[in-house]
Image (cartoon, helix red, strand yellow):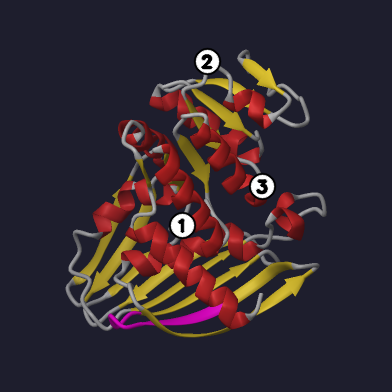
């Protein structure tokens, strides 16, 4: 499948572009409002996103623009009859999710959130463990302050650390059994209209208790710890492993080291291509619940 990419930022340059090549699905066109041709790119360059969407060489779209543009561009691409793989968050709130659902119903199009995390083999490996009950989860994901011109620092473009990486801790809640969120407590810090730090405690009806921390004001790191009545799972780089993922599961019987390898970006693209011909919208349970929880947290903490 031949892809057009809308927006060609750091993530695309450093990881996603190579993943398309590794997956065997070439990028044949780029839509860039700056008109700057990416280094080494010989395909079609469009100075408008619409030009890239309408390019006859393009069979599917990858949307990597600021968050504010995700829904309008998904809608435009579905209207053009092209499947869409859109970076997270695919929508910023329930109203935007409803817009996508309504457009899909009218067009029969296909749109999927580019959530590479769930395609890393470490998660299926962890599912083989007898994790036990009474689950207490702690996740932390932080990075340092961004330049003022970084889109994540701009409120009018859908910036803020919560919209950027809050979904990762919520994904861990989902993978470890959370479904019905019954209690929220926490605090947030906001600067110039964007979240810079969010610390939230979540209680789920299924018995999972979680503490999720994200910040754009701290040293770059990520971690996950899950303690249950059976043992302790430690994941040093749970959300974006560099190289092999090396995790540990500690029980009374000893400590097991879990090592997994995989190109989760390429796996995500392969999964999308395999299902792109199916009419529908990928608001599966995971996507729907994470979006709903994020809305509830945002309303509760007032940001």
- Indicate which disc, 1 or 3, sits on the residue closer to the N terminus: 3
Disc 3 secondary structure class: loop
- Indicate which disc, 2 or 3, sits on the residue closer to the N terminus: 2
In the drawing, what numbered circle is on residue 66?
3
In the drawing, what numbered circle is on residue 170?
none
Q: Which residue appears at 26% of the width and 76% of the height?
A: 231
Magenta segment boundaries in residue numbering: 199-208
Residue 12, relative to residue 91: is it above or below? above
Quarter of image, res 30: top right
- Left or right of 94? Residue 52 is right
- Indicate which disc, 2 or 1, sits on the residue closer to the N terminus: 2
In the drawing, what numbered circle is on residue 57?
2
Residue that label 1 marks: 237
Query: x%, y% of residue 151?
Result: 73, 50
Check if residue 205 falls in the magenta segment: yes
Quarter of image, res 137: bottom left
Q: Which residue appears at 54% of the width and 76% of the height?
A: 297
Residue depth check, mark 1 versus mark 3: number of the one nearer the observer: 3
Q: Are marks 1 and 3 in contact (CB under 8 Å)?
A: no
Residue 184, relative to residue 66: is it above or below? below
Query: x%, y% of residue 184?
Result: 49, 84
Query: Toward the viewer: 23 or 279?
Result: 279
Check if residue 6 falls in the magenta segment: no
Q: Badge 1 local density, few (<14 within 10 Å), some, or many (20+)?
A: some
Q: Are marks 2 and 3 in contact (CB under 8 Å)?
A: no
Real-space Cα separation, disc 2 to disc 3, in angstroms: 24 Å
Disc 1 secondary structure class: loop
The reply to whether residue 47 is visible in this rendering is: yes
Residue depth check, mark 2 versus mark 1: number of the one nearer the observer: 2
């Amino acid at each position: 499948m031949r892809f057009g990419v809308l927006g060609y930022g750091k993530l695309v340059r450093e990881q996603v572009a190579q993943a398309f090549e590794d997956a065997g699905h070439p990028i044949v066109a780029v839509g860039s409002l700056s008109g700057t041709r990416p280094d080494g790119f010989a395909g079609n360059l469009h100075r408008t996103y619409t030009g890239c969407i309408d390019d006859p060489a393009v069979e599917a779209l990858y949307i990597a623009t600021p968050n504010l543009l995700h829904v309008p561009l998904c809608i435009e691409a579905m209207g053009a009859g092209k499947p869409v793989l859109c970076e997270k968050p695919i929508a910023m709130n329930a109203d935007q999710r409803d817009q996508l659902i309504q457009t899909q119903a009218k067009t029969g199009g296909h749109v999927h959130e580019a959530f590479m995390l769930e395609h890393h083999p470490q998660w299926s490996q962890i599912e083989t463990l007898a994790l036990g009950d009474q689950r207490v989860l702690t996740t932390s994901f932080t990075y340092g302050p961004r330049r003022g011109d970084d889109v994540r620092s701009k409120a009018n473009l859908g910036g803020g650390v919560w919209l950027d990486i809050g979904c990762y801790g919520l994904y861990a809640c989902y993978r470890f059994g959370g479904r019905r969120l019954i209690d929220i407590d926490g605090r947030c810090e906001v600067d110039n209209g964007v979240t810079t730090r969010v610390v939230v405690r979540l209680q789920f009806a299924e018995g999972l208790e979680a503490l999720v921390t994200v910040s754009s004001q701290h040293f770059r790191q990520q971690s996950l710890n899950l303690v249950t009545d059976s043992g302790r799972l430690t994941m040093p780089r749970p959300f974006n492993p560099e190289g092999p993922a090396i995790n540990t599961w500690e029980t009374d019987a000893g400590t097991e080291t879990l090592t997994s390898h995989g190109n989760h970006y390429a796996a995500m693209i392969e999964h999308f291509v395999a299902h792109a011909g199916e009419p529908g919208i990928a608001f599966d349970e995971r996507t729907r619940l994470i979006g709903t929880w994020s809305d509830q947290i945002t309303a509760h903490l007032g940001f």
